[in-house]
Image (cartoon, rainbow, N blue to C red):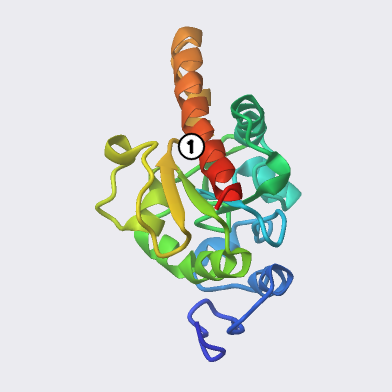
Amino acid sequence: MSEEDTSVGVQIPSQPTVAALREAAARCTACHLYRNATQTVFGEGPERASILFVGEQPGDSEDLAGHPFVGPAGKLLDRCMKAAGVDRSRAYVTNAVKHFKWVPRGTRRIHSKPNSMEIAACFPWLEAEIAAIKPRIVVALGATAAQALFGRTFRVTRERGRLIPSRFAPYAMATVHPSSLLRAPDEETRHREMALFIEDLKKIAGVLRSAKGD
């Protein structure tokens, strides 16, 4: 990415820090989503995180707080990471889209799935984040993140939990978004799906353990 790249409405330096990216992204107007969002919600975590998680977009809680993964799905991700033995302090969390897309339903703001143009408009930010962090493994949470990272034909249902090739990091994986666990129709299903999610996260822990022995 060059210093002349203004495809996101602002200039992205060729070798930016996360702090510089966050500051620049706050002014992004590359798509219309910024108009109805409270603020840009950029990624957060260690500058040299071993793991980089990519979700779909900030939700209502994240839009109001200005921080990613602080709502119910984020809290569930933290719990499952702990259960899988993944050190949360070594993880950077972000989203494929940095503004909350929503539709009104009474007094509530309901999540609306971002379209391909909105994802593409935000992709330079995600690409720059990954380049700045240089993680050992990139993990896509859900279909939107997976297709942004690995291509529009990628299917989480087919590739879930597998280590796959990627230009972004030495290792990459896709799994479900923790919000899908919250939408489970009953407690038995939720418990089963959470166990599967934790198993996926255990594979990430295994990658990081093996990396220490490299």
Viewer-proximal residue, 166 or 186? 166
Q: Residue furthest bottom?
A: 4
Viewer-proximal residue, 116 or 171? 171
x, y percent for residue 163 = 38, 45
x, y percent for residue 83 = 63, 24
Residue drawn 31% across and 58% down? 151
Q: Residue furthest top?
A: 188
Residue 166 falls in image quadrant: bottom left
Viewer-proximal residue, 70 or 32? 70
Residue drawn 65% across and 57% down? 43
Q: How many numbered markers are drawn? A: 1
Viewer-proximal residue, 56 or 30? 56
Q: Which residue is mark 1?
A: 177
Determine whether, in the image, residue 149 is placed left or right of residue 191.
left
Determine whether, in the image, residue 64 is placed left or right of residue 126.
right
Compared with residue 39, is residue 79 higher up or lower down, i.e. above or below? Answer: above
Compared with residue 143, is residue 161 higher up or lower down, i.e. above or below? Answer: above
- Give the residue type that dot 1 points to: His
Compared with residue 55, is residue 199 higher up or lower down, i.e. above or below? Answer: above
x, y percent for residue 126 = 53, 64
Residue drawn 50% across and 68% down? 127
Determine whether, in the image, residue 189 is placed left or right of residue 26.
left
Report helix, strand or loop for mark 1: loop
Q: For mark 1, does the 10 Å Cα neighbourhood hold few (<14), some (14 to 19), or many (20 or more) residues? A: many
x, y percent for residue 38 = 68, 56
Q: Residue furthest front?
A: 213
